Amino acid sequence: MSVFLNRIDKIANILKKDEAALVTSDISITYLTGFRHSEGYVLVTKNASYFLIDFRYVEAVQNAVKHIDVVMFSNSFDTINELLQKHDIKAVAVEDGTVTLSQYKAFKEKFNAEILDNSELTKVISDSRIVKTSDEIQKLYTAQKIAEKAYLEVLNFVKPGVTEKEIAARLEFLMKMNGAEGIAFDLITVTGKKTSLPHGVPGDVKVQEGDFFTFDIGAVFDGYHSDMTRTVAVGSVSDEQRRIYDIVLKAHLAGLAATKAGVTGFDVDKVCRDIIKAEGYGDFFGHGTGHGVGLEIHEAPYANTRYNEVLKENMTLTVEPGIYLPDKFGVRIEDTVLVTTEGFESFATLPKDLIIL
């Protein structure tokens, strides 16, 4: 419980005596309460905090959440106004990155307080979330183990004649059977020419001899995501396929070696990008090298040509360079890693040498 209280205290510390913070995004509410799948609010004042929830969830919340006062509402605006009056609140800060225009207008109209549309609340939450606690790290490891187990099982199913959609469906089934609450994103399981699409969508395309097959997959465990990409070959590979795979693997390994606390996301991206450029394929690596992973599948920090923030210990980062040759094939290799003072620890345990099924 102290972890959640510490997170709430960070918000309280930016507030004046007559100010409150209203947290509305599902991800932020999960981060502050540990309870997911709600449609409520968290209200934080200088000296008190509340989890406001409707009848559908109140019993589950009361059983699960002990570090914050749980209040059931029938009309959320009325209940929030009562609390604002109780604490003599004159202004309410909202999350500028997630509150919609319609929500903002409703808050301005309904609340008996000024609505502060600054970014400080959002920054406090994001700055806290970017560095993972030991509990969060363990959940990320578990999500990765679930995905890896499903991946190893489904490799036996990848053969000529099987469709991309069939493989995606089997992967999702295996992840859930192995303990996932869901998939981390729409799984990317594509074959043949479609591997040149960084975010290809599984369809009715059938695996053929000589294809590359791309797995970009992840599981969710207790709200936390995993993210991993492996490219495998079916039956045989051409010299060109092997050459491209080796270049991507070289860039991936170099990116991992460059990852540590104290460097920037730009630095990690540049190491990977320079290798691919030097081999003549710079125009075929069009996305960033990585992103953070946690309660969201894409979150800070990032590794790209624009991200100059310094990586810190216990941040997460994917390292996922790729080369995509239009109408031919593509290769991407991705691990999610934990940033350490000495380097990194990979959540992934699977080998990266080219597998020919």
Image (cartoon, rainbow, N blue to C red):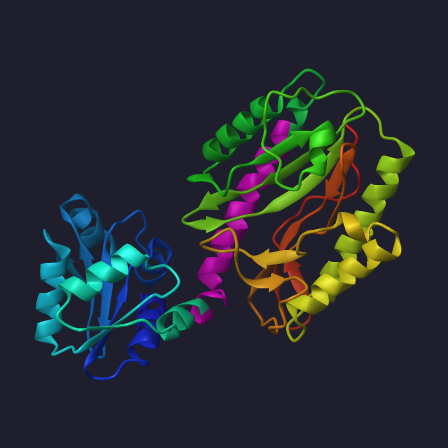
- State whether the magenta stretch is mostly helix, strand or loop: helix
Q: Quadrant of the C terminus?
A: top right
State the residue at coordinates (68%, 64%).
Answer: 305
Left or right: residue 338 versus residue 51 is right
Q: Position of residue 167 (x, y in %)?
A: 59, 26
Q: In which image quadrant can residue 191 be found? A: top right
Q: Position of residue 269 (x, y in %)?
A: 71, 62
Give the magenta-colored segment's residue range. 127-154
State the residue at coordinates (21%, 63%).
Answer: 107
State the residue at coordinates (75%, 20%).
Answer: 208
Tell me: residue 342, above or below residue 40: below
Residue in front for this viewpoint, 174 or 295:
295
**Residue that sits furthest to the bottom in the current view:** 17
Q: Position of residue 178 (x, y in %)?
A: 49, 35
Q: In which image quadrant can residue 215 be found? A: top right
Left or right: residue 249 versus residue 343 is right
Tell me: residue 45, above or below residue 81: below
